[in-house]
Image: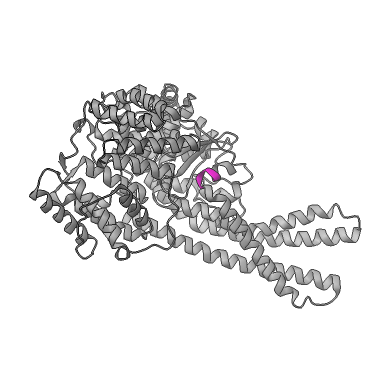
Amino acid sequence: MAATASFFEHQQLARRSTRIMVVLFLLAVAAIVVAVDAVFGLAYAIAFEEPPGDGLMWGALATAAVILVVSAVNVAKLAGGGEAVAKMLGARRVASNTAEPLERRLLNVVEEMSIAAGVRVPAVYVMDAERGINAFAAGWDVSSTVVAVTRGTLEKLTRDELQGVIGHEFSHIVNGDMRLNVRMIGVLAGIVFIGSIGQFLMRGSAETDDIRGVVALFTFGLLVFLVGYIGLFFARLIKAAVSRQREFLADASSVQFTRNPDGIAGALDQIGNTGSGALVSGRYAEELSHMFFGQGIKVWLGGLFDTHPPIDERIRRVNPGFQRVNYRNRRGSAAAGAESAAAAGASGFASGDTTAAPPAGRRNADVGAVWGRSAGDSAKLVGSLDGAKVDYAARLLASLPAGLRECLREPEGARAALVALLLAPKDDVMREQLQALRAAGLGTLADSAAVAAAMTRGLGPAHRLPVVDLALPAAKAAPEAARKELLAALEAVVYADRRITVHEFVVLTLVRSQLAPAPKPPAGGRKLAEMRDDVSLLLSLIAHAGTRPDAAGARAESLDASMRAGAKEMDLPPVAVATQLSLDAARASLEALRSLAPLQKARLVKGLFAAVLADGTIRVAEAELMRLVGAVLDCPLPPLLDDFSSFS
C-alpha cells in the first residue's frame, strides 16, 4: 500500500484528526460543565444560604445538553457545505461570465488548476469587505467545493502570488481537509456558546429595576462569561492542534503544483508587508480561523493558539533562499505586466504554447496509447498536484474556440454545450437526437444545442471532460427547473439511438452527480470484500470499455484477462465478467462504492488500473471512464492523456 499511499493516507489522517477533535471536544464539554456547576453552586449558596443539592446534577445535564444541541444545530446549518460557509462571511459568488479583470484572472487560475488536478471547477467567491490577504476552500467533498478570496488578495497579489495561494487551497481540497474543517465549525460552536449566554445575562442586567438584582444578575453573567472562556480556550487549542501541520503540507503542495516557490513565498511576504496582513474582520472570523490561508485573527498566547505557523517559518520551508528585498524589487517591475494580463483576461502561462488551434475530428476510442506505468504507479496519480499538468491545462484551455469559452460561462450556453457534447457526429443520427429533444418538449434547448454543436464537433476527446468541468459552474447556478430540464435533455439524447457509449455514460453520470448528487455515504467506511457485486460490475464496465466489440474470440480473452488482473490487484477471488451492463446498475454501483474506507478505495483504484493496463495500453474511453470513477469516488485523477493535439 505504501506505493499508493499519498492521497489515501492523507484521507485516512483526516479521519484520524476527526477522532482527535471529538476527544478534545468531549474534554472541553466536561471542563465547561464542571466550571458552570461551580459557578451555579456558588451563586445558589450565596443566594439561598444552603448547598444546591441535586441542582448540581441537573445543572450539569442542562449545560451538556445546551452545548450538544447548539453544536448539532450548527452542524445542520452547514449542510450546504462550502456555500453555507461563504455566506457566513458575507462572500459574493463571482459570476462565470464576469468581465471584471481581477475576477476574470481569478477564475482563469481556478479553472486551470481544477483541470490540472482533475477536480470539478469550484464555485468562486470574493469577500469584498475584507482588505487583508486571505483565502479559504470549503465543502463536504472534492466535487462540491468553493474557493473564496478576500478583496485584498485580488488587489494586492500578482498572478503568480495568486496562483500560489490557490495552489495552497487546492491542496486542502484534494487532501481531505475540508470536511474536517466544516465539521469543526459546527462542533466548536457549542463550546463557545456558554460565553455568549454570559454576555446576554450581563446585557439583560441593565434592564432590571432592583439594584440588588442588577448586581446579582451581572455578577452571575460575568462568571458565566468567564467560564465561557474555557470553551474559547479549548476551541482555539483544538483548531491549533488540527491545523498547523496541514498548513505546512498545503504550502509544500502549492510549490509542487505551481513549480514556483516565489509565488506562495511572495504571497506570504505580502501578508507581512501590508498593514492589514491576513486579518479578517467578519463576525465569524473566530469560528472560521482554522480554514484561512493566513492567520485571520489576533489571539493571546499566539505561539500556543495560532492556527497557522509563523510567516517567516512558512517562507523558509517553501523557499529557503527567498530574499525579501530582491523579490520586492522584481515584483514591482513585474506587477504592471501581471495586471495587464488580468485586464486582457489572459488564461495562459508564460511557458508552453497557448496558441494551438483546436484539433479537428474525433479520435477513435478504441485506439490505445502505450502507458508505461504500473497499476500502483497509476494509482499514485490520484490527488497528485503536478506542475506539468497546470501547463497542459493552460494550453488546452487556450486551444478551445473563443466562442465556446464564452458560451460555457452563461447558464443557457453551458446547458447547450453539455447537450451538444452528446450529439452524434453523423448528421442523420444527430437529427434523430434533436427530434427526441423536441418530442420531450425541449425544443428551445434542441435549437441551442444544434448551434453549439458547430463548436463542439471539432474537439478531440481530451477536451470532453474539461468542457464538462467548465460548463458545470454556470449550469449549477441555474434555477432548479433548468437543472432538471438539462438532465432530462441529456437522457433523451443518450437514449435516442437506443445504445449507450462509454462517452455518453461518462458525461451523463458526471453531470447528474453534480446537479443531482446522491446522499452522502455512511460514515465509517466499508471493505471491498463486503461489496463484491459492485466491484465486479465496475470491473466489467472497465473491461468492456477497453476491448473492441468486433474482436470476437479475442474480445472474450481480453475481457477475462482484464477481470483477472483487476481482481488479483484487489486481493479478491476471481470475479465473473458481466455480459449485460445497464446505465442504472453501473451508476448505482459507483454510488455504493463511495462508502469504502480511504485505503479500501486505494485498492479499488489500483485494481481498476490493473484491469485497464492488462494489455499495456490505455484507450481514450478507458481514460474517460477512470476519471469519471475518480470523480464519483472523490478520488480526483488529473488528465491521463496529456498530448491532446495527437488525439484527434
351 or 57: nearer the viewer:
57
Q: Does the magenta stretch include residue 141?
A: no
Image: 433 above or below 549: above
402 or 643: nearer the viewer:
402
The part of the image, by quadrant, that contains residue 10 is bottom left
Location of the C terminus (image quadrant):
top left
Image: 91 above or below 602: above
| Residue at 43% from the left image edge and 28% from the top image edge | 412
The chief SS type of the magenta part is helix
- Give the x, y percent position of residue 463: 29, 33
Image: 447 above or below 219: above
Q: Is residue 82 magenta?
A: yes
| Residue at 36% from the left image edge and 56% from the top image edge | 592
Judge whether residue 260 can be spotted in this image: no
| Residue at 60% from the left image edge and 58% from the top image edge | 71
- Give the x, y percent position of residue 279: 58, 42
Q: In this view, does 526 lie to the left or right of 280?
A: left
Magenta stretch?
Answer: 81-85
Judge whether residue 419 can be spotted in this image: yes
- Give the x, y percent position of residue 239: 53, 56
